[in-house]
Image: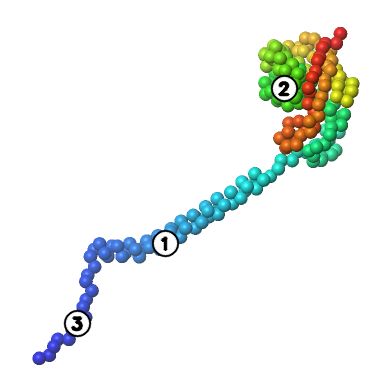
Amino acid sequence: MKRDAQKPKSKPSASPYDSAKQEWLERYGTYIAQARNWRYGAFGALAIAFLSVGGLVMVKNDQRVVAYVIATNGDGSVTEVRQMQAGVRPEQKHIRAALNEWITGARVVYVDGKAIESVVAKTYSMTLPGSPAFQELSQYHRASSPYTRAAQETVDVRVESVLPLSDSTWRIEWIEVIRARGGREVRQRRWQATATVEIRTPTEASELMKNSFGVFVTNFSWAERL
C-alpha cells in the first residue's frame, strides 16, 4: 500500500492582527529608524554644545578687562589711544582733570535725575571712604540734595582753575550759574575750594574703570568768593 507523499506543511494563516502589524512595520519601520537615529544625533549635538558652552564660560571667566585712555584735541578728534596700565602714577594734568570732575559732580544740579546720579557717583568714587572728605560731602548732600533742588532750579558748574598749592593740596575756583526750571538765569556765584588728595594706585580692572589714576580727595573746604 503506497504511502501518501508527505505534503509540505503550510504555514498557518496569519491573523488579521499579525498582517496589520507586518504591514505597519514595513510601512513605518524606516521612519522609526530614522527618527531614532535623529534623536541619537540630537543628543550628541547637545552634548557637544554643552561642552562648547562650558569652554566658552571658562574662557570668559579667564578674560581680563582692559581699560584704555583716549586722548582728543579741541575739536574732539582722537589723537591717541593707549592701554591703561596699573601702577602708573598720575601727573599734575591728571590730578587737575580729576579734581575738575570731582567738584563738578559735587556741586552740579541737573534736571535729569539719571544724570545727577551718574556724576555724583563719580565724585564719590574719587572721595576716599571713611575720610573727613567723605563725611563732609555726605553731610552736604543730605542738607542740599541735588535731587530736591532739581525740582526748583539747576546749577551749572564752570571750573575756572585748578592749581597746586603743594604736592597734595590744590585750590579749585569755579562759577555756579543758577537757573530756574524754565531756564531763566537767576544768579551767579563764585566759589573756591581747597582739597587734599591722596594717590592710591588701582590694581584691579574695576578700580581702573571707576578711578583710573587713583586720585582720592581726603579733605576739603569750600567757600563763596566775595
Q: Are marks 2 and 1 in contact (CB under 8 Å)?
A: no
Disc sitting over residue 33 in the figure: 1
- SS label for mark 1: helix
- Which quadrant, please, contains the C terminus? top right
Q: Is residue 211 above or below residue 218?
A: below
Q: Are marks 3 and 1 in contact (CB under 8 Å)?
A: no
Pointer 2: what residue?
130
Q: N-terminal of the two: label 2 or label 1? A: 1
Give, as a three-letter code, the residue at label 3.
Lys
Q: Are marks 2 and 3 in contact (CB under 8 Å)?
A: no
- Which quadrant, please, contains the N terminus? bottom left
Give, as a three-letter code, the residue at label 2.
Gly
Q: Residue at x 73, y 37 (%)?
A: 204
Question: x%, y% of residue 19?
Answer: 27, 65
Question: x%, y% of residue 159?
Answer: 83, 20
Q: Horizontally, is 49 left or right of 25 in the view? A: right
- SS label for mark 2: loop
Give, as a three-letter code, the residue at label 1.
Ala
Q: Residue furthest bottom?
A: 1
Pointer 3: what residue?
7
Q: Residue furthest top?
A: 226
Name the one closer to the observer, 34 or 94.
94
State the scheme by which the image is colored: rainbow
Question: For mark 3, does the 10 Å Cα neighbourhood hold few (<14), some (14 to 19), or many (20 or more) residues?
Answer: few
**Picture quarter containing residue 29?**
bottom left
Question: x%, y% of residue 108?
Answer: 75, 18
Q: Nearer the viewer, mark 2 or mark 3?
A: 2
Q: Nearer the viewer, mark 2 or mark 1?
A: 2
Q: Residue at x 84, y 28 (%)?
A: 95
Q: Is residue 205 above or below residue 181?
A: below
Question: For mark 1, does the 10 Å Cα neighbourhood hold few (<14), some (14 to 19), or many (20 or more) residues?
Answer: few
